Amino acid sequence: MAPLRDYGPHRDRRSNPSKPMTWTGRALAALAVAAALTVACGGSPSNSSAKSSPTPTKAAQITSVDACSLVTSADASTATGATLTNLAAGTGASVPGACIYGSQDSQASVLVFAQTYPDTTTADSVSPDQLAAVMNGQYGISNAKPVTGIGDKAFEYTATSAGGGGIVIFVFKSNVVLLIAVSPASDPSKVEALARIAVANLPKS
């Protein structure tokens, strides 16, 4: 597989070329590759994931999700303690399924990524362990732990890299898989609070 290319908003690089790219900005490319690999290979959940998998239902499915409507810039700013804005708003460039909040004056950033699947069973077959394993080589994702009370199931990871570290949480709700990454971050409760907000703001199926 060819090396992953870093993704970073052009606005940051023009205005401050020396500013290191944050972990969440670079993680987006790895996430896309990981998700594609998992689905293409028919990846199944790990034992820990399978045990907590909900029973599939025939409920109506969510057809589309706007990641920026799940977590607002105000929510992201509260979680990081810095004033963050939607980086795509100033450039006109966006990444499908993703919303990235950042600042010209801080290394703080929040990445929200949402992916819808045809049904709950398909979404539930996505393994966060496999996604994390693919991202681990470049971004140092480790220390997985299940988190209760968020969505149908959720898993949290810590992350470290040369550009900064943080906390990542994968959330499964109905036929949607969410990823929220906060960098820098050391308080899981703030990331989990963002995840709860995101789940509450999902479209009603």
Image (cartoon, grey):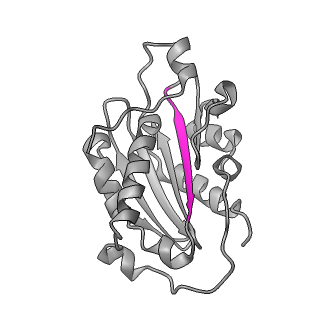
Q: Would residue 91 be found to the left or right of residue 109 on screen? A: right
Question: Does the magenta portion include 97?
Answer: no
Q: Give the magenta-colored segment's residue range.
A: 107-116
> Can the viewer see residue 39 in this picture?
yes
Above or below residue 175? Residue 104 is above
Q: Would residue 63 be found to the left or right of residue 193 on screen? A: right
**Residue placed furthest toward the right:** 204
- Where's residue 70, x and y in %? 67, 53
Q: Would residue 188 be found to the left or right of residue 150 on screen? A: left
Q: Nearer the viewer, residue 95 or 77?
A: 95
- Where's residue 103, x and y in %? 58, 26
Residue under the point 53% across and 13% down: 14
Residue under the point 38% across and 74% down: 49
The tally of labels here is: 0
Above or below residue 134? Residue 6 is above
- Where's residue 52, x and y in %? 43, 79
Q: Nearer the viewer, residue 68 or 168?
A: 68
Question: Does the magenta portion include 109?
Answer: yes
Residue under the point 72% across and 73% down: 205
The answer to which quarter of the image holds residue 7 is top left
The main secondary structure of the magenta stretch is: strand
Q: Quadrant of the N terminus?
A: top left
> Can the viewer see residue 84 in this picture?
no
